[in-house]
Amino acid sequence: MPHPAGRPARRSRPSYLAAPPLLSESEPFEGAALLREHPGALGAVLWKSLRDVSAWTAAAPDERAALFPPAAAGQRAAEVAGAGAETELWGPLLVVERLLAQPVDVDYRRLVHACRAIARWGERRGFTAVQLAFVQAAARLVPDHPQLAYSVGRLARDRGEYARAESWLRCAIRLARGTDWHTYALAYLSLGTLYQQLGNLPAARAVTLRGYRTTVRRRVRALQGVALHNLFAICSEMLDFGRAQQYALAAFQEYGPEHPRLPMLVHDVGCVWILQGRFAPAKDAFQMVLPRFSQPEDRLLTLGTLARAAAAAGSLAAYESSYAEAVQLLHQNVATPERASQVWLNLARAAASAGEYERAVPAAQQALALAGTLRLGQIRMEVESLLHSVNAARAAGQARLQAAPPVPVDPQTEQDAAAFLDAVRATVA
C-alpha cells in the first residue's frame, strides 16, 4: 500500500509545484452534498464519520491524541445502532468509531478499507455523493495512491464537479507517472472526456491523444480501443468526419468481436452517420448491433436512434417496431432522466420524419419537460428547434418533416465508412 497520510514517502521526482486537489467545489461545507442526498439519522452518521476521518487525516500526528472528546466513541456506537444502518455498513462505521476511541493507534489498512466499503455501498444504492465523499476520504488517507486519486476525479466528473475532477485527475497523472502506466493513461482519457463535456474540444483531443500514445508506448493494450473510441467521438464533434471515421475503424479492430464496448462504438458511429444525413447505413448498423445490448438503458438508447434513422430512411416497419419498444421501456423507467430526455427527443424526430406530427409533439414535450427539470440546455435548445420546425412544416402543409441533405464527404471517408459497415456485418450480425 502507498504511504499513508502523515508518513514520509519517497518520490521519483519533486512535486512541490503541484497544487493540492480540490476537496469540494460548491459545497458550503464538506459533506453537504452527502446530507442532501441522504437525509435522516443514517445520513447524519455517515456525515459525522466522514468529518471525523477528514479531521484525523488533516491533523498533525502529535495532535491526534486530543482530537476527539473521550465520550465520542460511545456516543457514535449508539448513533450507529439507532440509525437503522444496513448490515454491510456496521463494520465500516464501527471502524471509524474505533478511530474516535484510539486516534493514536490506527490501522491504516482497516480505515482505508472502511472508507472504500462505505463508498461501494453508496455506489450500489445510487448515492453518488456518498460514494465520492468516502473515495476521497480514502484517497486523502493514502495520498500517494494514483488509482484512488483517479477514482475521485472520475466520480467528480460524473457529478459535474469539473474543477474538482480536473484537480484530482491531474493528481493521478502526477502520481502514476513512471509507476502505473495504466492509471496514467486512464487519467488522461478521463481528462479528455471532461474537456469534451465542457466543450473545449481542442484540449480534449490533445490530452486524449497523449493518453492514446501512452497506451501504445507503454503497451497498455486494454485501453487502446477505448482511447481510439474517445478520439472518434471528439473528432466527430469537431466535424472532422474523415479522421473520425479512421479512428472508428481502428477502434473496431482494436476492440475485437467480444469487447463489451464494441456495440456502443457501432451505435456512436451510426449517430454520426445520422448527423451526416446517411440514414440507411445508420439504420442497418443499429439493427445489427441492437441484439448485443443486454442492459435495458443501452437498448433503449439504441431503439431511439434506430427509430430516428429508420423513419428518415423511409423504413416504416423498423420505425414502428423500434418506436413502440422504446416507449414501453421509457414507461418502465429503465433509464436515467437525462438518457430518457435524449430518447424522447430522438422519438420526436423520428415521428416528425414519418409525418406523424401527433406523435412528434407529445414526445418532444416529454423531452422538454425532462430537460427543463435537469437544466439540460443543449437538449432543450434542440427540442425547441424541432418544435419550431414541426410547426413550420404543418403550416406549409408538408406531409412529413424533410431531413437535411447529406453532408458531402470525401471519397476516402466514404470508403472508410463502407469498410466499417462491412466489418460490422462480418463481426456482429
Image (cartoon, rainbow, N blue to C red):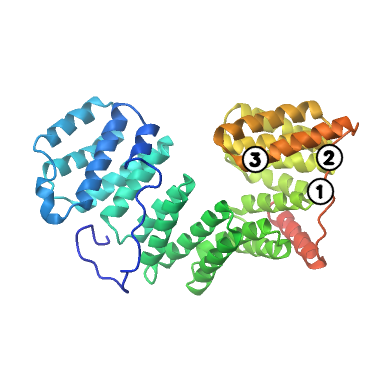
Q: Earlier in the sequence, mark 1 or mark 2?
A: 1
Q: Which residue is mark 2?
A: 315
Q: Is residue 335 visible?
A: no
Of helix, strand and loop, which one carries label 1? helix
At 23% from the left edge and 58% from the top edge, which residue is drawn? 4
Residue 352 position within the rendered picture, expressed as x and y whole percent measured from the top left:
80, 34
Quadrant position of residue 87: top left
Q: Which residue is mark 3?
A: 379
Residue 45 position within the rendered picture, expressed as x and y whole percent measured from the top left:
26, 33
Kindly check if marks 1 and 2 are in contact, taking CB atoms under 8 A apart as contact: yes
Residue 377 position within the rendered picture, expressed as x and y whole percent measured from the top left:
61, 41
User: Measured along the vertical axis of the image, is residue 380 above or below residue 259?
Assistant: above
Q: Earlier in the sequence, mark 1 or mark 3?
A: 1
Of helix, strand and loop, which one carries label 2? loop
**Drawn side of residue 119 relative to residue 239, left or right:** left
Q: Which residue is mark 1?
A: 280
In the image, which is nearer the foreground, mark 1 or mark 3? 3
Q: Earlier in the sequence, mark 2 or mark 3?
A: 2
Q: Amino acid at mark 1?
A: Ala
At 84% from the left edge and 34% from the top edge, which residue is drawn? 392
Q: CA distance from mark 2 to mark 3?
A: 26 Å
At 65% from the left edge and 32% from the top edge, which residue is drawn? 368
